[in-house]
Amino acid sequence: MEAFARVSRRDSRPLAVRHELRTKERTALDFSGNEDERYNHIFILRDLYSALFLCGDTSPGPDNIPYAMLRHLGEEAISFLLALYTRIWLEDVFPSGWRVATILPFPKPGKDSSVVLNYRPIALTSCLCKLFEKMVNVRLIYFLERDDFLSPSQSAFRKHRSTTDALVRLEAAACEVFARHQHLVCVFFDLEKVYDTTWQYGILQQLHVYGLRGPLPCFLKEFLSGRSFSVKVGTALSALLHKRRESPREASSVSHCLQ
């Protein structure tokens, strides 16, 4: 468990980097205002049902509430759930149970299983939270797409785009330079431990620069903070360990967009 937590700790970074991050974080970010923006409106039943339709049958988090249970809720229960989401949205509150994840370590193929870091940690979190994240993520993407904050070259986690777009762009560039008898330089790289080492304040600062205000960024701020997890191996469950200054690692629609 300590090995998984150590990756996201700030003391694993160079001293100069840590000093620079602490200096920048002294500036408080004020997200108040702009409640009338469309992305800050309260959610309606259609938003909830649309998000629930996209939920698969993934394993539940520590609360043991699966998506299947949510899909079988009656009208009264669904209305109560929407009222809960509305309160979270408007009152800037975040359930403490939603900050907790259960980590399941799976060995990486072809790696030495006696080395802890050769395991891929899969985080299970509350389906109630992930359902609301999907609803919020629609608003976040709307804002980023509307104001053209996303690079035209980005295909990941965007509607009607895929890896094929990047491959076609690469092929077109290659064909063009080959026709001119020139060279094409390509750089392919993989960012290691992205979710574990993402600078939380940096994400929020960028959203603040973009002009995002009101309930949406306030929810994201709460969503990113105060995370903790326990590791489960078989039937054994470890004690809770708190994480600091990282983006949630679990398969989260909001985390994908914020990267």
Image (spheres, rainbow, N blue to C red):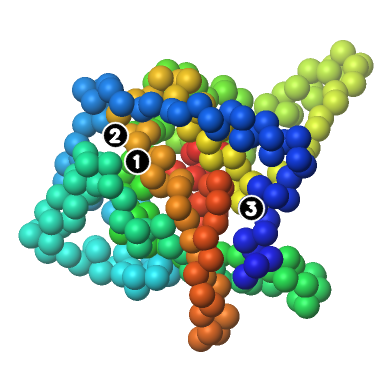
Residue type, mark 1 in image: Phe
In this rendering, is residue 29 above or below 4?
above
In this rendering, is residue 176 above or below 140?
above
| Secondary structure type for disc 2 | helix
Q: Is residue 157 visible?
A: no
Give the distance between the C-alpha atoms of the residues marked 1 and 2, in whole angstroms.
6 Å
Task: Judge by depth and name the residue closer to the eye, 115 or 31.
Answer: 31
The reply to whether the C-beta atoms of the residues labelled 1 and 2 are less than 8 Å apart is yes
Q: Is residue 5 visible?
A: yes
Mark closer to the chain start, 1 or 3: 3
Give the distance between the C-alpha atoms of the residues marked 1 and 3, in whole angstroms.
22 Å
Task: Judge by depth and name the residue closer to the eye, 93 or 60.
Answer: 93
Residue beneath the point at 41% across and 20% down: 211
| Residue 130 in picture, x, y percent from top left | 37, 54
Residue type, mark 2 in image: Pro
* Residue denoted by label 2: 215
Mark closer to the chain start, 2 or 3: 3
Work out which quarter of the rendered image holds the N terminus and state it: bottom right
| Residue 123 in picture, x, y percent from top left | 52, 63
Work out which quarter of the rendered image holds the C terminus and state it: top right
Residue 151 picture quarter: top right
The reply to whether the C-beta atoms of the residues labelled 1 and 3 are less than 8 Å apart is no
* Residue denoted by label 1: 219
| Secondary structure type for disc 1 | helix
Label 3: few (<14), some (14–19) or many (≥20) C-alpha neighbours in 10 Å: many
Residue 56 picture quarter: bottom left
* Residue denoted by label 3: 8
Residue beneath the point at 19% across and 44% down: 86
| Residue 124 in picture, x, y percent from top left | 47, 65
Q: Residue furthest bottom?
A: 235
Residue type, mark 3 in image: Ser
Question: Of the numbered discs in the image, which one, if any, rests on residue 32?
Answer: none
